[in-house]
Image (cartoon, rainbow, N blue to C red):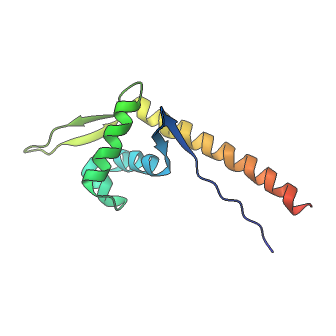
């Protein structure tokens, strides 16, 4: 029998979710596509939901997470700020550290 431990990490500000797996996926998709609309489609989110998540992050963050340009003839776009890119890195490091810790703790159960 193989034991498996599961957990989800998210970061809150004043009782509201600031960052979590889904929001990080959205930020990565924005970085890859350069567009909130394309990012939403690529991770199977409605544009409205993606916009709400991004707006929530931008409102809660100490700095803007993205820079958005309005559409038009050439089309608009969204790009991550350095702060937004650093949030992805920090969250992924926290997540990896958590998994490393949990794997060590699970080993204790295997040894019992």
- Total tally of numbered discs in the picture: 0
Of residues 58 and 81, the one nearer the viewer is 58
Q: Quadrant of the C terminus?
A: bottom right
Percent of width and height locating residue 36? 28, 48
- The residue sitting at the bottom extreme is 1
- The residue sitting at the right extreme is 112
Q: Is residue 18 left or right of residue 76?
A: right
Percent of width and height locating residue 52? 30, 45
Percent of width and height locating residue 68? 24, 36
Q: Is residue 107 left or right of residue 67?
A: right
Q: Residue at x 87, y 55 (%)?
A: 108
Percent of width and height locating residue 8? 59, 52
Can you tell which quarter of the image residue 97 is in?
top right
Can you tell which quarter of the image residue 55 is in?
top left
Q: Is residue 52 above or below residue 43?
A: above
Q: Residue at x 76, y 54 (%)?
A: 103
Q: Is residue 84 above or below residue 97?
A: above
Q: Is residue 61 left or right of residue 40?
A: right
């Amino acid at each position: 029998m193989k034991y498996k431990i599961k957990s989800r990490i998210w970061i809150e500000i004043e009782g509201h979710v600031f960052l979590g797996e889904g929001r990080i996926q959205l930020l990565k998709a924005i970085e890859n596509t350069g567009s909130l609309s394309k990012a939403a489609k690529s991770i199977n989110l409605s544009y409205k939901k993606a916009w709400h998540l991004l707006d929530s992050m931008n409102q809660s963050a100490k700095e803007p997470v993205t820079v958005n340009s309005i559409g038009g003839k050439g089309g608009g776009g969204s790009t991550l700020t350095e702060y937004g890119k650093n949030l992805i890195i920090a969250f992924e490091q926290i997540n990896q550290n958590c998994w490393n810790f949990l794997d060590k703790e699970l080993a204790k159960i295997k040894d019992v």
